[in-house]
Structures are given as structure tokens and as C-alpha cells.
Image (cartoon, grey):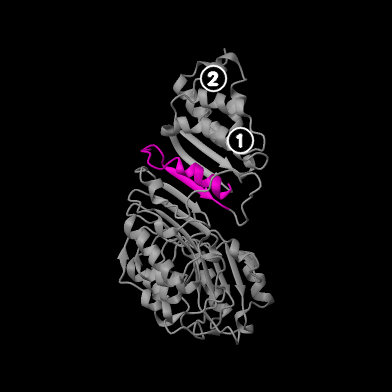
Amino acid sequence: MPSINILPYDVLQIIITSCREEKGESFALTASHVCRWWRRHVLDMPLLWNRLEFATRVPQWDMLETKLERSGRAPLDIIVKEEVFRKSGMPHLRRIMRIIVPHIERWRSLRIVDVPHKIRRVLLDQLRGKALPGLNRVEVVQEEKSDRRSKCRKIKSTSRHWDPRKIFDGLPNLRHLEWTNPKAEYRLLPPFRNLHSLKMGSRTLEIEAGQFIQLVFRILSESPALQVLSLHHGHELDQWHIENPDLEGFVQPPTIHLSLQRLHIVASLDVRSVIVRSLILPKLRSLGEPILYTDINVPCCKALAQSGSASNLRAVLITGTLDRLGGYVTLHPHMPSFPSAIMAFQRLVALVFRFIDFGGDNKWLPNLGQCCPDLKSLSFLLCTGYTVKAIQAIVEMRMKREEVESLEELRICAFERGCTANDEEAAWFSQVVAFDPTADDWWEINGED
């Protein structure tokens, strides 16, 4: 008998379950056809069969019902995608409901992807008035396209004043909520005392900037256990980063949130600035990804440093002031405090400066040779007021000092001739780091870990 066949059942179960997580859903079926001994044990592992995915135009109903039977009393993960309703809307919805609703008390997660809004509401209404302590993840994801109506006209529409609060009333252990639904009414979302992750995607929050800022503060105040908050403000971003003095009135006295680790706010720079400056986040590790949408301004740097929120950040994009009409970088009045603020970002792996005027002769250029010991990626994008010699000195100092990491990649893309590496300097940089004088790929920088 092969040695693997004498393994204790519990050990074999761990191995096969881990393989399914890595290889995908088909692994359970493959493992059940290896031999009689494997088949007997695989069919007796409910957690291998507890994922029910309705995602094809012609679902394999017999296979889905077999998986449900084999899942025993294991928690169920339900996935419903648009494709299943393209050929037949109402008949497929009825059949799905007959399969999953009788076992609703076993639901562990529910993911609804690109489903027409009438069907989406019918599925979510199954949660209304139910006590489902086992349901800990709900994801409602809708891409930017219109609902398909042709196969769903016979489905009775729910009320226009549909209230999602009643859906979530019976989910005391909900930990993860993703809500990307243009037809949702965000103000009706209830407080989630135990929520760990909340994501509201593009087109969900097409509201005024002031309302969006107040919503962020409300969510954080009502969700003390939250670790991940990802919100998209509107549909189009203000790429020019114009300061909006009207929003300064929304800046609040700093409020502490003890558990938030990831704050991803896709919004204009001025909106993000007001939010960040009003919070104290001692466990903050990330402002999101990609780095393109996570920039902060110079006042934000100072606020993060003073509040102690900067110490665990792994990547940051710092944007200065660009004159929109003239196309030139201007000196920010907060630059005198800038070098000392950067010293507080002790765990940075990636640092990007964009549109920063360092005051001429490197006056406000941080001494990056002696701080940020984990720093591996450094970029200067259309900055002024520094010299390439100063950057070369930073690279050399980090190479010599044992207590700091050497730089692995460097980008210098500048307006001014004095801020651009000449051929000799570029050749030197290319010998010691991955040097990019065009910075074409800077938005792909990942400093998460």
C-alpha cells in the first residue's frame, strides 16, 4: 500500500483541502477518482463540496445538487453570476432558489456578480427577517454596464424604497461586505459593529464631496472593529489635484480608530486630504493600491507624522502643487516641515514624490540616506528644486550603511535640466540600481509588502 494511504484521516483531509484551495474546484472531483480509498474519504469531506457556483448559461443542476448533498452540514459558499440568467431568467432563478433557500441557515458567504437588479434584490430579500449568525461575507458586485432586461421582465420588481438595513439586521457576525451597486442607497446602510472589511466600489457613491467625507467619518465611528475600508467617490477623479478651500470646513479634530489597517479612498486629492488629516490610525499599513490612487499632499504628510499614523505605512505617493494653467510646480508653504515629517515614515518600502518643489539647492529634500530603513523604491516625478548629485549621495549612503536597505529601483523624470541625470550620472545609477529616467511604469509600484 502506498505510504500516503496510511496517513491518518485528519492529515489527509488537511492535505486535500489545501490542494483544493490552490488548484480550484475541480480538484475534489479529480481526487475522488484516484482510487477507491481516496474516493471513500474525499466523498466524506463536506468542506470539499460546500461551494455552489451558478455561473454558466446551462448549469449542471445534477452536479450542483450532488455537491449540496455531499456537503452535509458544512457552511455553504454561494456564488451567483450574470451568465446563468442570459439564456433563461425566471426558470433558472426558480431552480436556484429551490436549491439554496432551504439551506439558508448554512450560508457562510454570498457573492452576487453582475446580476440584473431585479434578480439581485430577490436574492438579497431572502436575508430579510432571517437570523443568520453563520453568514459572515456578502459581496454584491456590479460592473459598469446596463442590466439585461430581456430575460427578467416577469420578475416582480421590489419597492423603490428598498431598505438594505432590513437585510442586514439578522447578520450579527457579518465580517466582510463588498457593495458595488449603482442603485443602492448608501445612507440606508446600517452600522456594523463587528465588520472587518467594507468595500464600496465605483459608481456606488456618486454624492457631493462633503457628504462623502461625512460618510467616511460615520462608517469609522460606527464600525470600531473595521480593518479595511475601501471607498470610491463618484465616477471621475480630479486628476489635476486642485485644492478646494470649501472642504476645509469638513476637517474635524483628530479622531482615533484603533483597528483600521488599510484606508483606500479613491477620490480627489483634496477630499482624501480632509479625511486623512482628521484621523489618527496607529495601525495603518496601506493607503491602497494601485499607488496612483493613493496620493496625499504635503499637509497630509505632516498630519500623519504628528498623529503617529505614518509609522507602519509601506508605500506612499506625495503630490505637491502644480499650476494647472502654467504647467509648472510651485513651492508649497508647508515644505519647511516636510523633511522632518518624512522621518516618521519608518517602514516605507516605496516612496514617490510628484510635483514637489524642494526649495532649490535641496533645501527641503529629506535625508533619505538616514531614514526609512526598508526603502527599496524611490521616484521623483516632475519635481524641482533638487540636484541629481544629492540623489546620488542618498544612493551611495544607503549602500554603505548596514542598518538601512540599499535602493533597488530609482526613477527620475523631471521638468528642469538640472534635475535630470546626464549620461554619466545615468550610467552610474544603472550600475547600482534599476534606473528608469522615463518613469513610464511608476503607477505599477507595489509597496504592500
Residue 3 position (above or below residue 443):
above
Q: Amino acid at mark 2?
A: Ile
Placement of the N terminus among the 4 image quadrants: top right
Q: Residue furthest top?
A: 1
Say above or below: 6 vs 25. Answer: above
Is residue 3 visible in the rendered image? The answer is no
> Residue at 46% of width from left, 40% of height from top?
109
51 vs 428, left or right, is left
- Under mark 1, the amino acid is Pro
For discs 1 and 2, the disc positioned in front in the rendered view: 1
What percent of the width, then of the height, locates residue 398? 50, 66
In the image, what residue occupies the spot 52% across and 31% down?
A: 98
Task: Kindly check if marks 1 and 2 are in contact, taking CB atoms under 8 A apart as contact.
Answer: no
Span colored in magenta: 115-142
Q: 79 or 350: nearer the eye?
A: 79
The residue wearing badge 2 is 4
* Number of the label disc, if any, that sits on residue 215: none
Which residue in the protein does label 1 denote? 91
Residue 364, x across and y down, in percent: 46, 81
- Name the residue located 45 percent from the left edge and 69 percent from the top edge: 272
Q: For residue 125: magenta?
A: yes
Badge 1, how many Cα within 10 Å: few under 14, some, many 20+?
few
Secondary structure beneath disc 1?
helix
